[in-house]
Image (tube, rainbow, N blue to C red):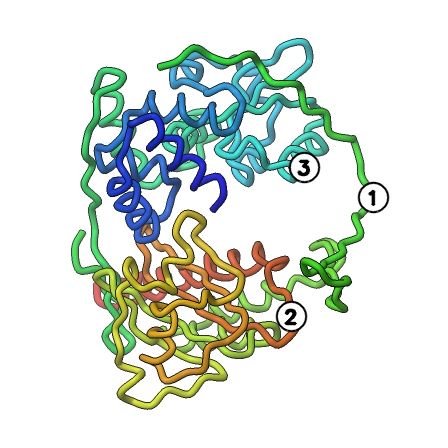
């Protein structure tokens, strides 16, 4: 959220967008996913060049203009394994004095720096790149397929002069649940000096994690062990999701898995920008409350995800958030977790959870995000099964 806010504030400060346009883009980001800059370009509020120039100011590293991807030597591409390029969304575009210049969506992701340097044995120099061009380069040089959204946007950008604005319409519609049936209803400025080279160690001992609450001693919550040191419980979830035949089974698998750390939760489906209760775990709603429909973009609780597309933290003490709990006849908890579920660049579900007392779940954000991705894939798989059976 911090960097998204900095980008939005910087764009407003440079008179490139208005506060209303920023809010429109943040709402679109929640519905369609992706980066804030992508949504601003799609809505015609910002040019590609202005986005690149502002990103380099926000991150303090050079911007990778599209023409830098025109001719990349094969030996440069081969410095980065395909698996690493795909996982961290990075593309090497130059090799100078044994330092790989790397295009990244988030050049300040130090965890990615460490893993990339360890996996490749290379020193790296991070540059910032808008995701639309990075996905284009990943497809061109690593054969990693782009989604339709980014293909459409790139084609539009390539047919316009630098600096010209455009509007891109999103295709497709919501996924509609009818009992166990899922159906689709429709089809600038000068470059700054190059940054210092980031040199990551060849190997590193596992870090000891200490979690503290501001102004208090460290809590007794154990650190989440590295993935390599614990059984991958998500593997079992994957097997169950693959075997699921209905949307109800999918929801049950996901909520049962997450209940060990988040015992009270609600899974919402999202249709037409409104969230409806799909299934609950540890929370009982009467029939009248279960049928409630909430606006995704105007509901204050869901707005906590604006700019970051996830939220782990306290419930703000304001009237809007209290109305959410009043509408469901629920007490206001101390901490909550919010995660979106995207399928084909469309918000199709939303996870709301209340962690157990004294449990810090923010350290497991990556695992929860993977779980939501698996949920989306399972929803799509059921759709495909239904289409096969109906054909």
Give the number of marks.
3
Going 24% across and 43% down the picture, which residue do you hit? 20
Closest to the observer, 203 or 274:
274
Residue picked out by circle 2: 359
Please tell me which of labels 3 and 2 falls first in the chain: 3
| Label 3 packing within 10 angstroms: few (<14), some (14-19), many (20+) | some
Residue picked out by circle 3: 115
Disc 1 to disc 3, C-alpha distance: 13 Å
Closest to the observer, 218 or 41:
218
CB atoms of marks 2 and 1 within 8 Å: no
Q: Is residue 219 left or right of residue 379?
A: right
**Is residue 152 placed above or below 243 in the rendered structure?**
above
Closest to the observer, 333 or 378:
333
Please tell me which of labels 1 and 3 falls first in the chain: 3
**Is residue 69 placed above or below 183 in the rendered structure?**
above
Residue picked out by circle 1: 205
Disc 3 to disc 2, C-alpha distance: 28 Å
Find the residue positioned furthest to the left.
186
Find the residue positioned furthest to the bottom.
286
């Amino acid at each position: 959220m911090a960097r998204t806010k900095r980008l939005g504030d910087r764009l407003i400060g440079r008179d490139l967008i208005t506060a209303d346009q920023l809010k429109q883009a943040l709402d679109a980001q929640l519905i369609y996913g992706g980066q804030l800059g992508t949504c601003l370009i799609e809505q015609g509020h910002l040019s590609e060049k202005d986005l690149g120039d502002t990103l380099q100011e926000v991150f303090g590293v050079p911007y990778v203009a599209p023409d830098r991807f025109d001719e990349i030597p094969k030996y440069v591409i081969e410095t980065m394994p395909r698996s690493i390029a795909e996982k961290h969304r990075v593309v090497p575009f130059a090799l100078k004095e044994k330092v790989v210049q790397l295009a990244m969506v988030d050049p300040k992701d130090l965890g990615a720096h460490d893993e990339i340097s360890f996996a490749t044995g290379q020193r790296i120099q991070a540059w910032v790149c808008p995701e639309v061009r990075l996905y284009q380069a990943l497809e061109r040089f690593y054969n990693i397929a782009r989604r339709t959204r980014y293909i459409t946007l790139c084609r539009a950008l390539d047919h316009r002069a630098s600096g010209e604005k455009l509007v891109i319409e999103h295709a497709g519609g919501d996924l509609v649940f009818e009992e166990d049936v899922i159906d689709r209803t429709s089809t600038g400025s000068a470059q700054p000096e190059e940054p210092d080279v980031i040199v990551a160690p060849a190997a590193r001992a596992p870090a000891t994690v200490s979690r503290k609450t501001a102004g208090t001693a460290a809590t007794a919550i154990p650190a989440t062990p590295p993935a390599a040191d614990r059984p991958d419980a998500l593997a079992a979830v994957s097997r169950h999701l693959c075997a699921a035949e209905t949307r109800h089974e999918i929801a049950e698998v996901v909520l049962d898995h997450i209940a060990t750390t988040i015992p009270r939760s609600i899974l919402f489906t999202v249709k037409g920008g409104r969230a409806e209760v799909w299934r609950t775990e540890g929370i009982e709603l009467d029939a009248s409350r279960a049928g409630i429909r909430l606006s995704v973009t105007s509901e204050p609780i869901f707005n906590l995800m604006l700019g970051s597309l996830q939220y782990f933290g306290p419930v703000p003490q304001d009237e809007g958030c209290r109305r959410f709990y009043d509408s469901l006849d629920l007490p206001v908890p101390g901490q909550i977790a919010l995660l979106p579920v995207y399928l084909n660049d469309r918000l199709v579900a939303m996870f709301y959870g209340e962690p157990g007392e004294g449990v810090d779940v923010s350290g497991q954000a990556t695992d929860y995000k993977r779980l939501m991705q698996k949920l989306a894939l399972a929803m799509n798989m059921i759709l495909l099964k239904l289409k096969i059976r109906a054909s």
